[in-house]
């Protein structure tokens, strides 16, 4: 089959021992050997399993964010019914004000919601995508990267979108979390080599498919969703390149302790960044 595919004339014959002999012309021996050796190498690479995804944390990040969003809405209300409240006046992602330097709105807008269905959709997405990112990287690392990607996405939306653009919602952050997982999956598959490496694009395709299914619609903030997915993917690829999971649990016990401490500090830093953005927003609003 291999020789036929590359166009090398050949003949298969039975041997007296009951096996088979593959015959080619003397001039084709070297080329046939190379073709068969390449086939064997690719077959072994195709059988190589994809490296297992790390499982450093739990789904706690998605649960905590979902509960936090649900609790915060009791304080802020909904944009459709409470648009005139000080919370929305100070925290909505207003493109003109973002361009004028009110960067904190890129953070605060991710904690506000338009209505009940908007809130419930983002809570569900947080449970799935943020939970997955937290399991992979640890809650604190994932939280900080999601916050950075979501903030950057809102700033990019204000800069490249319409000047009269207003938006609220955690969907920018949830798509950033999805992008983070996509980037990590791309790196994981790339490290698999061979057949697995050639399928690294599948993760990116899946992310774009979810963007098309979940992030587009008549009322959807398409720019923010797309930028969130893109920024999350970039940070996910960067995190995946830096991160090389240890295989020996005993030899890396100090690393595990350091990772746990770092995740705790980063989780506090992410929470502090959101609280600080709201402090600035309310003080200036």
Image (tube, rainbow, N blue to C red):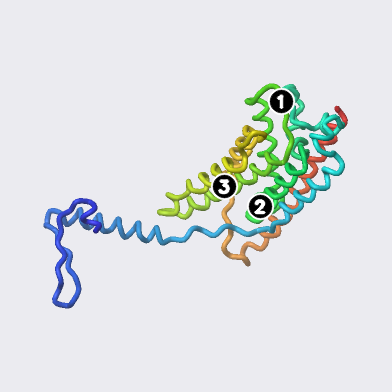
Question: Who is closer to the viewer here, 155 or 33?
Answer: 155
The residue at 65%/29% (across/down) is 157
**Element at label 1:** helix
Task: Tell me the CA gap for discs 1 and 2.
Answer: 29 Å
The residue at 14%/68% (across/down) is 13
Q: Which quadrant of the view contains residue 174? A: top right
**Element at label 2:** helix
Task: Tell me the CA gap for discs 3 and 2.
Answer: 13 Å
- Counting residues from the start of the chain, the first of labels 1 and 2 encountered is 1
- Counting residues from the start of the chain, the first of labels 1 and 3 encountered is 1
Question: Do the CB atoms of the residues marked 1 and 3 lie less than 8 Å apart?
Answer: no
Give me the disc on residue 95: 1
**Element at label 3:** helix
Question: Who is closer to the viewer here, 14 or 57?
Answer: 14
The residue at 37%/61% (across/down) is 44
Give me the disc on residue 128: 2
């Amino acid at each position: 089959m291999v020789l036929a595919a590359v166009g090398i004339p050949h003949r298969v014959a039975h041997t007296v021992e009951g096996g088979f002999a593959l015959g080619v012309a003397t001039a084709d021996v070297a080329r046939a050997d190379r073709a068969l050796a390449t086939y064997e190498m690719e077959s072994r690479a195709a059988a190589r399993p994809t490296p297992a995804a790390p499982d450093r944390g739990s789904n706690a990040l998605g649960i905590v964010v979902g509960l936090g969003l649900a609790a915060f809405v009791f304080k802020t209300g909904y944009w459709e019914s409470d648009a005139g409240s000080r919370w929305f006046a100070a925290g909505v992602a207003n493109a003109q004000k973002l361009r004028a330097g009110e960067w904190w709105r890129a953070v605060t807008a991710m904690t506000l919601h338009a209505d009940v269905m908007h809130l419930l959709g983002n809570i569900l997405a947080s449970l799935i995508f943020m939970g997955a990112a937290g399991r992979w990287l640890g809650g604190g690392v994932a939280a900080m990267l999601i916050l950075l990607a979501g903030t950057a996405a809102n700033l990019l939306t204000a800069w490249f979108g319409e000047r009269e653009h207003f938006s609220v919602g955690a969907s920018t952050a949830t798509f950033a979390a999805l992008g983070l997982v996509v980037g990590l999956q791309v790196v994981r598959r790339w490290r698999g080599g061979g057949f697995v490496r050639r399928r690294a694009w599948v993760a990116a395709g899946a992310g774009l498919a979810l963007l098309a299914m979940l992030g587009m619609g008549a009322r959807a903030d398409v720019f923010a969703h797309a930028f969130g997915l893109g920024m999350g993917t970039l940070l996910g690829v960067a995190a995946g390149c830096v991160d090389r999971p240890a295989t020996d649990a005993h030899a890396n016990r100090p690393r595990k302790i350091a990772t746990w401490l770092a995740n705790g500090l980063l989780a506090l830093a992410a929470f502090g960044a959101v609280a600080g953005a709201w402090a600035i927003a309310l003080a200036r609003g």
